[in-house]
Image (spheres, helix red, strand yellow):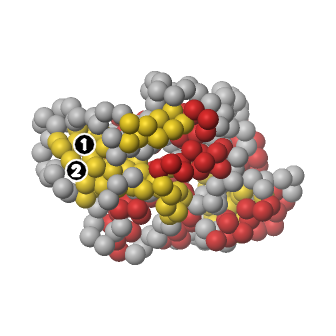
Amino acid sequence: MKALLMSGPAVDGSATNVAEVPAPEPGPGQVAIDVAYAGINFIDVMARRGDPGYASGWPYVPGLEVAGTIRAVGAGVTGRQIGQRVAAFTPGGGLAQVALAGAEVIAPVPDGVALATAASAPLVVATALLLLTERARLRPGETVLMHSASGGLGSVVSQVATALGGARRIGTVGRPDKIADGLAAGWDHVFARDGDLADAVHTIAPDGVDVVLDPTGTALLDLDLSLLAPGGRVVLFGNAGGGTPAPLPPAGRLIGHNAGIVGFSMSRLIATDPRAAAEALTTGLDLVAQGSLRPGVTVVELDRVAAIHDLLSKGLGRGKYVAKIGN
């Protein structure tokens, strides 16, 4: 079968190629999926550059979310049928014609939902729902700020925040030329992360924001806390900059401001509570089927994925990308 193969760590796409590799067979508790589309994510870039814990070994086939049809089921799997349309979290290996997934972390794709859209649901739609409901505990009337708001996740977070009754949605982007992308993603106000960011945010939300969603690690944590309203929450859900995150601030700063810092990792949730991950995926797909959420995707061919990784690594990506793999 064809797969996107990373031969070793690299700063660019020079070690990434489409190659022929053996198709995997499902083990106990697994399903094999004929992949129609696979999501492309910044976490693939983190694996490519050799950040610890992202590539299971070299050579490595990336890809953590797919949509397609069940090809085969392993021992002990019940309630899943060959030919069933599904979306799934994958432990790597998604950017290939056949991918494996645990039977407990797949969800049926409702009629009317395109598989290209469904391929974005595991790491975009489900993540957006979990960030705002389970981790941020967003309440009606509260203000949400998200860093890196112009991407595919940002566009869905803005929709979920509205559905939950969020009063204001503020996005930040890395460069001024991405402000238009952030506005197109549905944010009410979008600012570049520069020296004037705190003043700009306080102009919109003079009492501070209630929720900050931060995928950058801890590099912006001092800024995040300075933007919080009393009782506000910061949700850290990534480490896009790589390296070792800086220590968290002293407890006194949090206690004195009634502020909270919580973390979220989809990969750890899948490992420790796969049912919760699958439920979020199922709920997200149902919301897409109902028209309540409309995630947009840009479809590229498999041989273009390395170039998309390069764009993402430079902060030049626009929205959510998925790769077309099969029928």
Please give left or right for residue 69 compared with residue 127 in the image: left
**Residue assigned mark 1:** 32
Q: Which mark is residue 70?
A: 2
Q: Is residue 108 visible?
A: no
Across the whole image, how many numbered discs are drawn on residues?
2
Q: Is residue 65 visible?
A: yes
Please give left or right for residue 73 compared with residue 207 in the image: left
Name the residue type under label 2.
Ile
Front position in the image: 297 or 158: 297
- Among the 4 quarters of the image, the one containing residue 109: bottom left
Task: Give the image location of residue 116, x and y in percent.
Answer: 40, 62
Front position in the image: 213 or 302: 302
Which residue of the protein is positioned furthest toward the right in this rendering?
195
The residue under the point 54% across, 51% down is 304
Distance in Å between CA atoms under marks 2 and 1: 6 Å
Front position in the image: 299 or 118: 299
Q: Which mark is residue 178?
A: none
**38 to 254, vertically: above or below:** below
Could you say whether the residue bearing mark 1 is in a helix, strand or loop?
strand
The residue under the point 66% across, 27% down is 244
